[in-house]
Image (cartoon, helix red, strand yellow):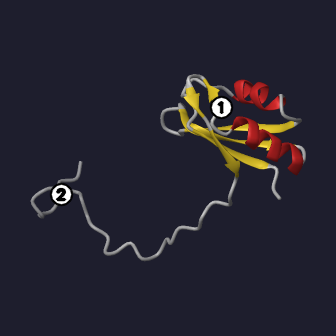
């Protein structure tokens, strides 16, 4: 069993330190990794917390799934690998340059 946990339904104000403190009550936290939006720099509302043993991970799931952190009921379960998304077959590429279809003026 894995020791990496998915933690969902986080408040946008939750920090990695908040996660570290909340999960430390249930075992040794190896890492707390809050997922951030690249564009806005804001939290995406979920994180991954790695516990030191599978037993501690199970204990943390039992205690923290449904628990409240920052006025939000958390979703905590074993992290699953990211699913592969097909890349190739997206259909024909469309050109959204606009204009009247004539030659563009070059400066």
Few, some or many C-alpha atoms within 10 Å of disc 2 (few <14, some 14-19, many ≥20)?
few
At horizontal 22% and vertical 53% (from top left) the residue drawn is: 106
Please provide percent x and percent y for residue 20: 77, 29
Q: Is residue 77 above or below residue 102?
A: above
Q: Which mark is residue 67?
A: 1
Label drawn at residue 104 = 2
Upstream in sequence: badge 2 or badge 1: 1
- Counting from the top left corner in percent of width and height, residue 56 is at 86, 43
3D distance between C-alphas at marks 2 and 1: 59 Å
Q: Residue at x 17, y 54 (%)?
A: 105
Does residue 64 sit above or below 17 in this rendering?
A: below
Please state the horizontal and vertical placement of residue 44, each as a whole percent of the image: 54, 38
Above-or-below relation of 58 to 34: below
Left or right: where does residue 91 sit relative to residue 15?
left
Say which element carries label 2.
loop
Q: Residue at image x 75%, y 41%?
A: 62
Q: For residue 47, which quarter of the picture?
A: top right
Q: Is residue 73 left or right of residue 17?
A: left
Pick the front one: 91 or 102: 91
């Amino acid at each position: 069993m894995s020791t990496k946990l998915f933690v969902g339904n986080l408040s946008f104000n939750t920090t990695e330190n908040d996660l570290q403190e909340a999960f430390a009550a249930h075992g040794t936290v190896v890492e707390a990794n809050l997922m951030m939006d690249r564009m806005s720099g804001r939290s995406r509302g979920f994180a991954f917390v790695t516990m030191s043993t599978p037993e501690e991970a199970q204990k943390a799931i039992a205690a923290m799934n449904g628990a409240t952190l920052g006025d939000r009921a958390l979703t905590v379960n074993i992290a699953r690998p990211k699913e592969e998304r097909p890349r190739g077959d997206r259909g024909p590429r469309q050109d959204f340059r606009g204009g009247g279809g004539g030659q563009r003026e070059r400066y």
